[in-house]
């Protein structure tokens, strides 16, 4: 299947700092990517839709100023968690589709101390 | 928001037994995907079903999509410990890949 890759897989940061997570489609171009958040023992919750060349679309209840999304190219979307706090600690996962099937990255575990 | 109900939430069985996971919605999805997720990793796509009434087989896994494209099931025959994991169904709103996930089913297969 298609390959979607995330980096970093794990990140630990201090409260108040910002963290950037990258999502790349390695073997296809993706004008649209999606960012999800997953808490322990729970399913995935859609945070936002990342659109290449335009603003991201955020789901209800997701702070756009807290979770900055940039989709600067057809193969890269970034999620920046700004002024991170311990409650932002979570597993963040991105996805993209080459047209048939939706593929996910490996996920990024964020721990905010 | 279309809701996707997945059941059961937890399933513990012995090696060699069969199991079925259900995914139901009151709304129609353009397609439905099934994933398996290991702890600390992203979901891995098992199958995508698109056509109402469709049946797909992947070795010991059989996936069905309801005629009305509102429900789906995953059946595992002769489960093995390697089948242990979190199984997720996800309905697609459109062709771009925006998904609505079910709550997930944690499957544990003991030797």
Image: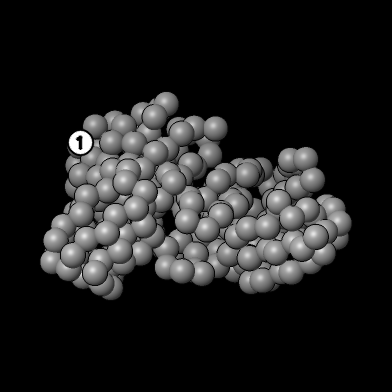
Relative image position of residue A80 (x, y in whole percent) = 21, 53
Quarter occupied by residue A25: top left
Residue A64 rendering spot, x and y as whole percentages: 19, 60
Expressed as whole percent of the image width and height from the top left, the position of residue B83 reads 71, 53
**On the picture, is A42 further left or further right than B106?**
left
Q: Nearer the viewer, residue B46 or B70?
A: B46
Q: How is the image coloured?
A: one colour
Where disc 1 sits, the SS reads: strand
Q: Is residue B103 above or below residue B85?
A: below
Residue A47, x across and y down, in percent: 33, 59
Q: Nearer the viewer, residue A96 or B109?
A: B109
Asked if one can make out residue B95 in the rendered structure from this viewpoint, the answer is no
What residue do we see at 83% from left, 52% from top? Answer: B77
Position of residue A28 in the picture relative to residue A74 (left or right):
right
Left of A106 or right of it: where is B35?
A: right
**Label 1 neighbourhood size at 10 Å, few (<14), some (14-19), many (20+)?**
some
Residue at 36% across / 43% down in the picture? Answer: A6
Q: Residue at x 46, y 34 (%)?
A: A3
Q: Can you see residue A55?
A: yes
* Residue identified by numbered label 1: A72
């Amino acid at each position: 299947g298609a390959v979607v890759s995330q980096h970093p897989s794990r990140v630990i940061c201090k409260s108040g700092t910002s963290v950037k997570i990258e999502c790349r489609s390695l073997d296809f171009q993706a004008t649209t990517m999606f960012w999800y958040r997953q808490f322990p023992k729970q399913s995935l919750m859609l945070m936002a839709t990342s659109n290449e060349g335009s603003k991201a679309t955020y789901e209800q209840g997701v702070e756009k100023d807290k979770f900055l999304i940039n989709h600067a190219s057809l193969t890269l979307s970034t999620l920046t968690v700004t002024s991170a706090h311990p409650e932002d600690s979570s597993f963040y996962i991105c996805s993209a589709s080459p047209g048939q099937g939706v593929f996910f990255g490996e996920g990024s575990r964020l721990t905010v101390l | 928001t279309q809701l996707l109900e997945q059941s059961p939430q937890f399933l513990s069985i012995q090696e060699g037994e069969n199991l079925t996971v259900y995914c139901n919605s009151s709304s129609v999805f353009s397609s439905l995907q099934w994933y398996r997720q290991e702890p600390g990793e992203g979901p891995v796509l098992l199958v995508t079903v698109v056509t109402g009434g469709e049946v797909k087989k992947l070795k010991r896994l059989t996936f069905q999509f309801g005629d009305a494209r509102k429900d789906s099931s995953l059946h595992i025959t002769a489960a093995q410990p390697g089948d242990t994991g979190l199984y997720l169904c996800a309905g697609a709103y459109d062709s771009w890949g925006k998904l609505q996930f079910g709550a997930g089913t944690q499957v544990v297969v003991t030797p």
